[in-house]
Amino acid sequence: MVGSRIMTSLSIDPQDTIAAIASAVGGGVGVIRISGSDAESILRRHFRPLPITLEPRKMIHGWWHDQDGTPVDEGLAVFMAGPRSYTGQDVVELQLHGGALSLTQSLAVCLAAGARRAEPGEFTRRAFLNGRMDLTRAEAIADLIGARTERALDAARELLRGRLYDLAMEVREAILRIRAELEVNIDFVDEEVPLVDPLGLARRAEELAGRLEELAETYVRGRLVRQGARVVLTGAPNAGKSSLFNALLGSARAIVTEVAGTTRDTVEESIEVHGVPVVLVDTAGLRDTPDRIEAEGIARTEAALATADLIVHVEDVSQAPLSSPPSNGAPRLLVASKADLTPTRVLDGAIAVSAVAGTGLSELRDAIADALGVGELSRGGLVIAHERHHEALVTAAGALRAASQGLASAAPPELVAVDVADATEALGGLVGLTTIEDVLDRLFASFCIGK
Ligand SMILES: Nc1nc2c(ncn2[C@@H]2O[C@H](COP(=O)(O)OP(=O)(O)OP(=O)(O)O)[C@@H](O)[C@H]2O)c(=O)[nH]1
Ligand SMILES: [Mg+2]
C-alpha cells in the first residue's frame, strides 16, 4: 500500500542527487546546497579552480561555470563527505551572490548536470533517514526557522538540543525494563522462578505515566507559542476598536475618525502578547446599514469571527449601549473603552481602557494572555508545541495507566504486555524509531525548500 510503509531510521535514502537554493534570495550571499552521490562530480565539473584532492569542510574560492564553461558567478565552495554531513550523504555547498536571477542560473547548472530539484524539507528528511537526527530534532529545525517570538525560538532550541528525545528515550527504556520483568511472569508462571511483584510494576508504570502527562499538559501553551492566536476586535461603530487596535500595535495603522462606520475592510497586524504571536484583527462595527461597502465590511467581520481564538468586544461606556457581543464559541473579553470620558454606565467584568490616554492596555494584554490560556511563560524549559508530540505522549501515558491498572487488578500478564507494548511504540514513533511514511510526508511538506 503506497504511503503507509513502516520504515526505520536504518533505511537508507535514495542516492539520487538533489539540489536547491538553501538561502532566502535577495540577501548578500546565497547558498546552493547539493546532496547525493554526484555532488562531488558536479562540483568538479563546474567549479574552478579546484585542488586534485578535496579536503572536506574546507572553503575554496573560485568561479562557478555552466555546462559550456562560461563563468556564472564567483564564490566559495565547500565539500562535506558523507556520512559526516547534514544529510549523511556527500554534500556540496556553494556560497554565491544572493541575487534571485543569478542563483536561479547557478541552480540550473546543477539540474543540467543531473541533479534533481529538492522537495521542501528533503535535505532534512535524508538527514533523518540516514540516522543523522531523530524526528523531533528534524521538526525543531523547521520551528527554529519559523519562530516568530523569542518564546517560540526558546521552545525550538530546547527541541533541537534533544530535550524531548532524551526524555522519550529515557521513559522508553524504563518501560522496556518493565516489559522484560513482565516477560518473567509470562514465561515462568508454572515454574519455581520467583515472580515479579505486580504492584511494584504498577507503581512504576503510573509514575512514568505521570511524567508524560505533566509534559503533555504544556501543550496548551506550547501550541500557542508556536502557532499563535487570532484575536478579533468587535463592537458597535465608533466604539473605539481601531483606536484600541492602534494603541496595542503602537502605531497608527488603522484609520480613526469620529464618523461611525469608518472601518470597512478588516485590518490585520501581528503583535506579541506574553510570548505568543497574536494576529490582531480590527473589524467594521456591526450594525444594520444601507451602505453597500459597509455591509460588505460587516460580512468580513463575520468571516473574521469564524476564525477567532478570542473575541475582544469593545463598548463605549460614555454612550448608551449599542451592541451586544457576538458569540461563536470562542472565549470573549469585554472592554469598556474611552475610560478618560465620563462613563454613563457600568459594564460588569469589563476592562477599562483609554486608547487616548494609554491606560488599561497592560491589564488588557494580561487578560488576553489569560483568556488564551498562556499563563506566565517561563523562559527555557521544555514545552510541547506539536500536535504529533502531544498525541504520542497522551497515547503512551494512557497505555501506561491501563497497564498499571491491569497489574494492580491482577489481570493476566499477557494482556498487560499489550498495553506496555503500545506505550513503547508510541514513544518510538515520537522520536522516529518506527515511522509511518505518510507521517514523514506530512511532516516534511511543511518545510521550506533547501532545508
Ligand atoms: N476620548 C476618547 N476618544 C476615543 C478613544 N478611543 C477612540 N476615541 C474616539 O472615538 C471615535 C471613534 O474611534 P474609532 O477608533 O474610529 O472607532 P471604531 O470602533 O473603530 O469605529 P468604526 O470603525 O466606525 O466602527 C474617534 O473620534 C476617536 O478619536 C478614547 O480612548 N478616548
Ligand atoms: Mg474602526
Image (cartoon, helix red, strand yellow):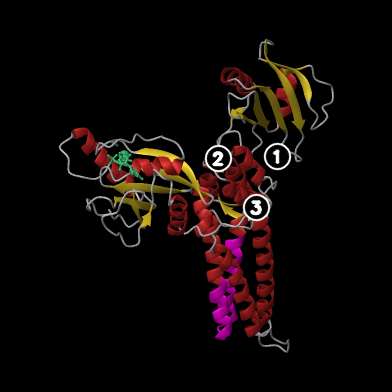
Task: Mark 1 or mark 3: name the one nearer the start of the chain.
Answer: 1
Which residue is situated farthest in the left direction here? 290
Q: Tell whether 324 sits left or right of 339.
A: left
What residue does disc 3 label? 158
Mark 1–mark 2 Cα distance, whole angstroms, equals: 16 Å
- Quadrant of the rendering where the C terminus is positioned: top right
Query: Magenta part of the protein: which range?
Result: 400-427
Q: Which mark is residue 447?
A: 2
Q: Is residue 289 magenta?
A: no
Residue at figure coordinates x 61%, y 42% from the top left: 125
Please identify, in this view, whether the residue under mark 3 or under mark 2 is nearer the observer. 3
> In the rendered structure, which amino acid carries the disc numbered 2?
Phe
In the figure, 254 relative to 49: above or below? below
Report which residue position mark 1 lands on: 86
Element type where label 2 sits in the image: loop
315 or 436: nearer the eye? 315
